């Protein structure tokens, strides 16, 4: 059965800290790995990763995929209180574009 | 301009009632989805329609019936509501085969009392 696992499930850090969120997967017909940020409402798209070893960056956020280890990490440097959210990792399959979500990592950044 | 919209945003109803949630997207996408997010925040796919055809139908009670009148709309009807149906329901859309994930609507928080 397809599975996406994230760790840690929750994390509390101080502003300015750097955090690393982990995602691992066991999914057939892999197309891409996706990261989303969910604050109070709908998940918003952060990154799509399809190739191993190529870092994607957006401001203080970056992510990389390791297809050999079936995993990905999301790094956030110099965290701010506005980074507090649930970070969802998901894997998109080639079959019917189905997306399997992980349980999310709840990140709280305190001043 | 709202890309994916859902109505209503909040729905409070009693057990046994029947209710509908509507979803519309103006992105020109051909595929739409319904997801359920429970109290533990686990987001799980329920249904997917591509050009009005059902392509993903997960293990969901048959009290849930999606309907897609056209590729810009996907509605969700729920019969005989139960306490366990309380959750946030998200609609999403994408262009089939293009990859890159989906665009989500704002969610409908359903509370069954």
Image: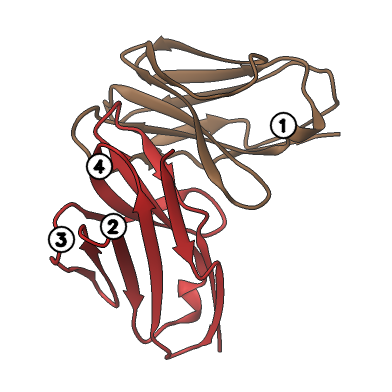
Chain colours: A red, B brown
Residue A71 vertical placement versus A77 (above, below): above
Q: Chain of mark 2?
A: A
- Mark nearer the N terminus (4 vs 2): 4
The residue wearing badge 1 is B85
Q: Are marks 4 and 3 on the same chain?
A: yes
Q: Chain of mark 3?
A: A
Total numbered labels: 4
Q: Residue at x 64, y 44 (%)?
A: B38
Q: CA distance from mark 2 to mark 1?
A: 33 Å
Label 1 neighbourhood size at 10 Å, few (<14), some (14-19), many (20+)? some
The residue wearing badge 3 is A52
Residue B48 vertical placement versus B12 (above, below): above
Element assignment for label 3: loop
Q: CA distance from mark 1 to mark 3?
A: 39 Å
Q: Residue at x 43, y 28 (%)?
A: B33
Q: Chain of mark 1?
A: B
Q: Are marks 3 and 2 on the same chain?
A: yes
- Mark nearer the N terminus (3 vs 2): 3
Q: CA distance from mark 1 to mark 4?
A: 30 Å
Q: Are marks 3 and 2 in contact (CB under 8 Å)?
A: no
Q: CA distance from mark 4 to mark 2?
A: 10 Å
Q: Are marks 1 and 3 in contact (CB under 8 Å)?
A: no
Q: Position of residue B68 (x, y in %)?
A: 44, 12
Q: Position of residue B47 (x, y in %)?
A: 47, 24
Q: Residue at x 85, y 24 (%)?
A: B15
Rendered image quadrant of residue B65? top right
Instruction: Give the label, 1 or 4, closer to the camera.
Output: 4
């Amino acid at each position: 059965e397809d599975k996406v696992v994230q760790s840690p499930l929750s994390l509390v850090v101080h502003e300015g800290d750097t955090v690393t969120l982990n995602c691992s997967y066991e999914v057939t017909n892999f197309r891409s790995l996706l990261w989303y940020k969910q604050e109070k409402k709908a998940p918003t798209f952060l990154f799509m990763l399809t190739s191993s070893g190529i870092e994607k960056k957006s401001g203080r956020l970056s992510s990389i995929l390791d297809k050999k280890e079936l995993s990905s990490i999301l790094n956030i440097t110099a965290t701010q209180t506005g980074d507090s959210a649930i970070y969802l990792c998901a894997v998109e399959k080639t079959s019917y574009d189905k997306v399997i979500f992980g349980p999310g990592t709840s990140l709280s950044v305190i001043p | 301009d709202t890309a994916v919209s859902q109505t209503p945003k909040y729905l409070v109803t009693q057990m046994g009632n029947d209710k509908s949630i509507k979803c519309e997207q103006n992105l020109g996408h051909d595929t739409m989805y319904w997801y359920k997010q429970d109290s533990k925040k686990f987001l799980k796919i329920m249904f997917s329609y591509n050009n009005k055809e059902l392509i993903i139908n997960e293990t969901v009670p048959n009290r849930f019936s999606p309907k897609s009148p056209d590729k810009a709309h996907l509605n969700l009807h729920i019969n005989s509501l139960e306490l366990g149906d309380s959750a946030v329901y998200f609609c999403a859309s994408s262009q089939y085969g293009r990859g890159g994930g989906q665009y989500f609507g704002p969610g409908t928080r359903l509370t069954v009392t």
